[in-house]
Image (cartoon, rainbow, N blue to C red):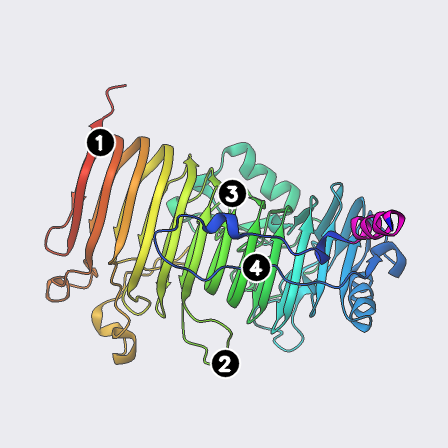
């Protein structure tokens, strides 16, 4: 009997980790609001190595077909783990299917090819390209391991001249290859006539720039696990689950140049039941960002509901934790706690604008430490309007919006911030409910029922910049201390 039990234990220990459900319940202890908890996706115990299906990790051989072969082989088996061993695995787009886990060994690097033509969508030759790693309407999918996924984004992104040194500017032009557009503060570098010799995929640099897409995007999926991997240098957003339910991001590192245009790190767009824990971000745009756009009736999720964000570190980002700019469907039961932010432009950023706004409910943010915040430690902004790189467009007027768009007004309310310590911010707290569309539209109190307590912020220039007509913040035991160096 003892021998039998020993054999069973030995067999269980040899099973792939993905088959053993992980318990994330410990993160849900002592919550300020009741939330639905995430569950680990179930992946069958089958395994296939990329080398078994034609993969060559020499950094030269294109492995697009090998990834497709491995996923097809596992799908016929009912699903399982596609192992990516040590090597540099050059590839075009990868599409995951139901019950598939992509597992990267520590010294494995999946590198998206600089050949943009591989990513052109044959169904939309003049539109957006195919995502680097994508899943659509799938269940039980995972990306795990200790390896790196690199989007080769330098060959896609424009670069603002004001954000790079002379040496860096010369590198972009001479190593990658491109053209300069605009002048003065609006001078940009666009990758074009790539030095690698691969063709352009659009008529102009500006049109090609608009074709860039996310590195990892899961749309209308259920039961997602992203664990352990490093995701870097995306053409656009790095990790972007949207309209999806039951999403776990655990121990992930996201990194890209600080000046990477639209280089968002982790964006949850319309995610229900999500968890982001133990992760590290150093990115060119928003860090940990929640968004909610147009309603999709057939999607598993609309709005951001039951999201827990805990034990994370954000270095550079435009905002460390960000809500918006789209907040249309719902922002409800979101908890952010025990995180550290160091070197971000803003700390806690709530941003939206007319046509993309909605109402927040039951948001709790606590136990946050910050240092070296360039602008505001905490900011509420209702007049945010996104502008593409190089754009000289003026902010829209009220008459520019349709009646339907005018229904989506940003209302930041029922937000509770507790126990924040920040050393070093230009402005401690800034808030305005103004839509920025003229005085006749600015008198509604769009920022209200905001509680900030037990907080200390050492500021460099301004303690409070709060528009009393449009924003009401309740401050309790809040110390705003000028930085005397």
Residue at image x 70%, y 69%? Answer: 97
- Mark 1 secondary-structure assignment: strand
Per the model, the C-alpha gap separating discs 3 and 4 is 16 Å
User: What is the magenta range?
Assistant: 2-15
Residue 9: x percent and y percent? 80, 49
User: Does 227 sit above or below residue 428?
Assistant: below
Our reading of the magenta stretch's main secondary structure is helix
Q: Mark 4 points at which residue?
A: 214
Does residue 200 appear in the picture of this structure?
Answer: no
* Residue that badge 3 annotates: 281
Q: Mark 2 points at which residue?
A: 298
Q: Distance between the residues labelled 2 and 4?
A: 23 Å
The residue at which mark 1 appears reads as 461
Nearer to the camera, 332 or 137: 332
Measured in 3D between alpha carbons, the distance from the residue under mark 2 to the one under mark 1, in whole angstroms, is: 49 Å
Sequence-first tag of 3 and 1: 3
**Whether label 4 touches label 1, CB < 8 Å:** no
The quadrant in which residue 475 appears is: top left
Gap between marks 2 and 3 measured at Cα: 32 Å
Q: Quadrant of residue 324?
A: bottom left
Residue 471 visible, this orientation: yes
Q: What element carries label 4?
A: loop
Q: Distance between the residues labelled 3 and 1?
A: 27 Å
First along the sequence among labels 2 and 4: 4
Q: Are marks 2 and 1 in contact (CB under 8 Å)?
A: no
- Name the secondary structure under disc 3: strand
Using the rendered view, name the quadrant where residue 65 is placed.
bottom right
Residue toward you, 384 or 290: 290
Q: Tell which of 450 and 394 is nearer to you.
A: 450
Mark 2 vs mark 1: give the one in front: 2
């Amino acid at each position: 009997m003892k021998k039998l039990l020993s054999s069973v234990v030995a067999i269980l220990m040899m099973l792939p980790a993905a088959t053993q459900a992980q318990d994330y319940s410990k993160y849900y202890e002592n919550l300020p609001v009741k939330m639905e908890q995430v569950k680990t996706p179930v992946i069958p115990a089958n395994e296939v190595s990329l080398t078994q299906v034609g993969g060559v990790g020499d950094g030269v051989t294109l492995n697009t077909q090998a990834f497709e072969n491995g996923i097809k082989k596992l799908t016929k088996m009912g699903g399982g783990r596609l192992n990516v061993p040590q090597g540099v695995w050059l590839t075009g787009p990868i599409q995951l299917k139901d019950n598939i886990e992509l597992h990267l060994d520590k010294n494995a690097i999946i590198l998206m090819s600089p050949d943009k033509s591989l990513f052109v969508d044959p169904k939309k030759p003049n539109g957006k390209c195919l995502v680097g790693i994508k899943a659509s309407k799938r269940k039980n999918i995972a990306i795990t391991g200790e390896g790196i996924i690199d989007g080769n984004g330098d060959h896609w992104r424009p670069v603002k001249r004001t954000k790079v040194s002379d040496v860096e500017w010369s590198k972009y032009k001479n190593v990658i290859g491109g053209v300069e557009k605009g002048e003065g503060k609006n001078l940009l570098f666009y990758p074009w006539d790539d030095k690698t010799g691969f063709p352009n995929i659009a008529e102009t640099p500006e049109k090609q720039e608009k074709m860039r897409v996310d590195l990892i995007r899961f749309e209308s999926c259920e039961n997602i696990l992203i664990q352990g991997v490093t995701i870097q240098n995306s053409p656009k957003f790095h990790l972007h689950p949207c309209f999806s339910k039951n999403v776990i991001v655990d121990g992930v590192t996201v990194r890209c140049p600080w000046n990477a245009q639209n280089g968002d790190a982790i964006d949850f767009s319309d995610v229900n039941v999500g968890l982001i824990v133990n992760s590290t971000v150093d990115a060119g745009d928003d860090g940990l960002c929640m968004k909610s756009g147009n309603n999709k009736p057939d999607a598993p999720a609309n709005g951001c509901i039951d999201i827990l964000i805990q034990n994370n570190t954000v270095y550079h980002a435009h905002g460390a934790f960000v809500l918006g700019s789209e907040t249309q469907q719902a922002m409800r039961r979101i908890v952010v706690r025990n995180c550290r932010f160091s070197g971000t432009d803003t700390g806690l950023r709530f941003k939206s604008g007319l046509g993309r706004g909605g109402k927040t409910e039951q948001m709790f943010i606590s136990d946050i430490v910050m240092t070296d915040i360039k602008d505001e430690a905490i900011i509420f902004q209702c007049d945010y309007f996104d502008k593409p790189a190089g754009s000289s467009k003026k902010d829209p007027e009220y008459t520019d919006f349709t009646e339907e768009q005018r229904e989506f007004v940003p209302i930041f309310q029922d937000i509770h911030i507790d126990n924040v310590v920040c050393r070093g911010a230009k402005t401690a707290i800034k808030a305005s409910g103004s839509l920025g569309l003229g005085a006749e539209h600015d008198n509604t109190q769009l920022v209200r029922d905001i509680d900030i307590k037990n907080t200390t912020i050492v500021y460099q220039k301004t303690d409070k910049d709060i528009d009393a007509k449009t924003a009401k913040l309740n401050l309790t035991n809040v110390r705003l201390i000028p930085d005397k160096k």
